[in-house]
């Protein structure tokens, strides 16, 4: 597959479930090797969209294209799904009484034994499953089950991987292991992927591009930096990270400042906002300082605990960082 080639595309997809519009006029393009994150709140239609793209569900209107070829309706196929597009559900659907190796090998059952053995080894290494390779699937942790499902899907050498909330319910250790597996995947397999998540930090960290889904509509697409730094609405601004809204008497626009753009200053000439510290919250690798002044609240971050509740602070920020929507 050529880099830049469009692997999977959705054109004007519309879906109603239980009489309710769940997806409206969805247009998407996934390029070869690209990771597209679909970011949306619970109920925004993410799983439904993945099921349509993975060929498990038909849209009422619109089409799905794989390498420019319009795919036939799922209802007209003997089996749902598509060989080149692998959807990994949140339930993983492993064989519970088979080991990790056996679950992966099952996907390679039509290959010769030498290739099969080599592929299983490679996939176990990529997904960091060495320590549980002989364990039955039913005894695996959620993160291990998920990586086994990813390894098994990769065994079929799909062009597109569809991941439903890959980071949900993972503890920090399993998140880091999955992160390493994803990095291996991107480097060694160049697999294209669409993953859905309700966590902005995951979408920002793992996507080449992001599509924001709100009530079944894509309201913004762009690189993680574009979506974070130039959100199209207050909804996207708040969905993608912490926000301070600043009231302005001079216009009707909404102005905001990301907390990481705010600095402390001792120089009254540089002070743009004055207030008192009202709360200090420890987040492990940083402190969140909440201040109140002139009937407004503002939060910013510090890496050292040098402030106290009740202390007066003067704050400064660059004019370009005061954004408006
Ligand atoms: N079979 C169905 N019948 C009726 N409504 C449905 C059906 N399946 C999903 N829905 C509704 O469609 C909407 C979108 O569901 P979907 O599972 O796609 O959202 P989601 O963004 O993946 O949510 P979550 O993050 O909570 O999994 C929800 O309001 C859901 O209740």
Image: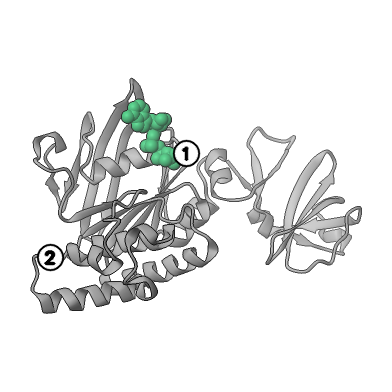
The outermost residue toward the top is 19
Q: Residue furthest front?
A: 97
Coordinates of residue 78 in the picture (x, y in percent): 8, 41
Question: Mark 2 and 1 residues: CB-CB less than 8 Å, in contact?
Answer: no
Q: Is residue 123 above or below residue 22?
A: below
Mark 2 or mark 1: name the one nearer the start of the chain: 1
Q: In front here: 96 or 282?
A: 96
Name the residue: 21% across, 34% down: 58
What SS does tag 2 mark? loop
Vertical placement of residue 72 versus 68, above or below: above
Quarter occupied by the C terminus: top right
Q: Which residue is mark 2?
A: 109
| 48, above or below 173, in the image | above
User: Residue at coordinates 22% horizontally, 55% vertically from top-left?
Assistant: 6
* Image quadrant where residue 253 sits: top right
Is residue 216 in sight in this rendering?
no
Camera-near label (2 vs 1) is 2
Q: Position of residue 110 (x, y in %)?
A: 8, 65
Question: Which residue is nearer to you in this view: 269 or 96?
Answer: 96
Residue found 42% across the figure and 65% down from its top = 178
Can residue 30 be seen in the rendering of this structure?
A: yes
Q: Quadrant of ligand 1?
A: top left
Disc 2 and disc 1: Cα gap in Å? 37 Å
Q: On the image, numbered disc 1 is attached to which residue?
A: 42
Q: Is the residue marked 2 within 8 Å of ligand 1, measured from its CB?
A: no
Badge 2 crowding class, 10 Å Cα cut-off, few under 14, some 14 to 19, many 20 or more, is few
Looking at the rendered image, the quarter that the N terminus falls into is: bottom left
* Residue 113 x, y percent position in the rendering: 11, 76
CB at disc 1 and ligand 1 closer than 8 Å: yes
């Amino acid at each position: 597959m050529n880099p830049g080639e469009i692997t999977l595309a959705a054109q004007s997809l519309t879906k109603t479930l239980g009489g309710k519009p769940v997806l409206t006029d969805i247009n998407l393009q996934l390029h070869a090797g690209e990771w597209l994150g679909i970011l949306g709140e619970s109920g925004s239609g993410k799983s439904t969209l993945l099921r349509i793209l993975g060929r498990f569900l038909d849209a009422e209107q619109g089409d799905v294209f794989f390498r420019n070829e319009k795919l036939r309706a799922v209802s007209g196929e003997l089996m749902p799904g598509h060989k080149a597009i692998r959807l990994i559900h949140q339930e993983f659907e492993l064989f519970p009484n088979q080991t990790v190796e056996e679950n992966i090998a099952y996907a390679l059952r039509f290959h010769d034994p030498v290739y099969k053995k080599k592929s299983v080894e490679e996939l176990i290494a990529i997904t960091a499953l060495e320590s549980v390779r002989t364990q039955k699937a039913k005894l695996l942790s959620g993160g291990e089950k998920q990586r086994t499902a990813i390894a098994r899907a990769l065994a079929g050498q799909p062009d597109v991987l569809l991941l439903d909330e890959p980071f949900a319910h993972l503890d920090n250790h399993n998140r880091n292991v999955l992160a390493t597996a994803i990095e291996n995947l991107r480097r060694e397999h160049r697999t294209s992927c669409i993953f859905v998540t309700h966590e902005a930090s995951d979408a920002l960290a793992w996507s080449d591009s992001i599509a924001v889904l709100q009530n079944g509509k894509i309201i913004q697409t762009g690189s993680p930096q574009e979506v974070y730094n130039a959100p199209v609405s207050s909804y996207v601004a708040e969905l993608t990270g912490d926000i301070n809204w600043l009231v302005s008497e001079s216009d009707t626009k909404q102005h905001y400042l990301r907390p990481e753009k705010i600095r402390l200053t001792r120089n009254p000439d540089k002070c743009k906002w004055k207030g008192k510290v009202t709360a200090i919250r420890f987040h492990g690798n940083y402190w969140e300082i909440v201040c109140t002044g002139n009937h407004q609240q503002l939060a910013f971050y510090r890496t050292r605990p040098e402030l106290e509740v009740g202390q007066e602070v003067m704050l400064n920020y660059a004019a370009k960082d005061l954004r408006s929507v």
